[in-house]
Amino acid sequence: MKAYWQLTLAQLRIFLRNRQVLFWTLAFPIFLMVMLGSFLGNGNGMSVTIGYVDQDHSPQSKQLADILKKNEAISLEKTSSKKDALDQLKQGDVQLVVEVPKGYEKRMKNSSQNEKPFTLPVFYNETDMAVSQIGQQLVYNAVDAVSKQKADYKPAVVINPKGVEALNLRYIDFLVPGIVAMMILSNNMNGVAGQIASWRERGILRRMQGTTLKAHTFIAAQITARLMLNGLQALIVLMVARLVFDVEVRGSWLTLVSFVILGTLAFMAIGFIIAGIAKTPESAGPIAGFLSFPMLFLGGVFFPIKNMPEFLQPIVHILPIAHLTTALRETMNVGATFMSLGTEALVLGGWIIGAFIVASLTFKWE
């Protein structure tokens, strides 16, 4: 136990004394967050994403969907469940939800001058009235176009806007969890690979092997030190985000810490694999960079995963960084519980087990 704590403290001292490491693992992510947050923090997309719930499943309802799709300012997402569509609206994934009730086609075909127009429910985000009003106008134009196709023009269908209380998320709210995930990836995968490869080349690992030090004690000390560092760094980033941009953690801090731990273990294990494969510290860096660089862009750090091309989606959904960013973002922005993020926890757990098994086979003391 004494050797374990000595190694843990030694690792912490090495980190704190290295100014370059301090900059790239802490100061640079904060600088990146502040710069992107200052320019894009309150920005929103120019298009309006509308959830479309078709409960009539008729040619008339499909015609309305086609009219909405033709508008370049509208991104239409068809959803079979009204509940799912409203959940997306509350979480900020869509700006409006259009519901086409059963009986829409029948009423459209049999409408007369004396009948009241058919009411089409349209749910909008009360916390973002600017986008909601634009979206309502776009939907109104679409349903008005349907009415104008009748020979005896009279509004045959009108919209019935209904406000829904939703989260008012900005780009900075999206960005901060991604920055935390980026730090965890960089500190552990890149940091472990380079440090272990360097210690092996300098003979430090060989001298450790010649003592009574157990391999599991060495690895446990590494894990403990990096968990402490990652926790401290994540806390500092969240404090800066709170003070500068008023970013909140809506979920449980325990859930947030749990995924920081899972992410640390997963990327540490990958770092040990790279350190075992790399013959020199010079080769460890490029290998780690070759793996980490694509992850930053495919894993949802800076851009939403759902915006990735369709052919990349299967690859994206097996990356550990994608599940880490999703878990951190859902916890911070939506207040998701650990149980509701079971898929993310299982995937990260699978990476931890699989990567540590491979690392145990590839790890070399000298």
Image (cartoon, rainbow, N blue to C red):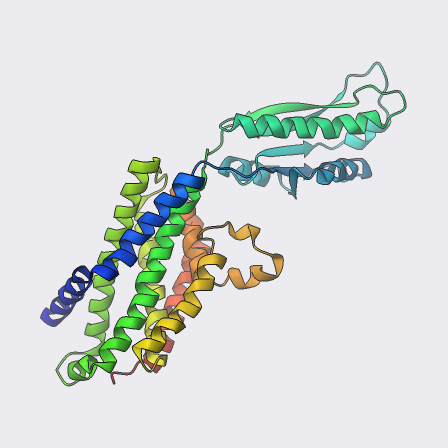
> What residue sits 66% from the left and 23% below the top?
160
354 relative position to 233: left or right: right
> What residue sits 60% from the left and 29% below the top?
123
> What residue sits 43% from the left and 62% below the top?
320
- In the displayed structure, 124 sits above or below 65; it is above
Residue 252: tell me if it is visible: yes
**Residue 151, x across and y down, in percent:** 90, 24
Q: Nearer the viewer, residue 259 or 49?
A: 49
Q: Which residue is at the far right? A: 151
| Residue 47: quadrant of the picture | top right
| Residue 34: quadrant of the picture | top left
**Residue 154, x across and y down, in percent:** 82, 19
111 relative position to 133: left or right: right
- How many tags in the picture? 0
**Residue 153, x across and y down, in percent:** 85, 20
Residue 338: tell me if it is visible: no
238 relative position to 112: left or right: left
User: Which of the image's four quarters has the N terminus?
Assistant: bottom left
Q: Which of 333 and 142 is in front in this view?
A: 142
> What residue sits 79% from the left and 23% below the top?
156
Q: Which residue is at the far left? A: 2
User: Which of the image's four quarters has the C terminus?
Assistant: bottom left
Q: Which of 244 and 121 is in front in this view?
A: 244
- In the displayed structure, 290 sits above or below 277; it is above
Q: Which residue is at the far top? A: 114
- In the displayed structure, 321 sits above or below 122; it is below
**Residue 194, x across and y down, in percent:** 30, 72
Q: Which of 340 and 191 is in front in this view?
A: 191
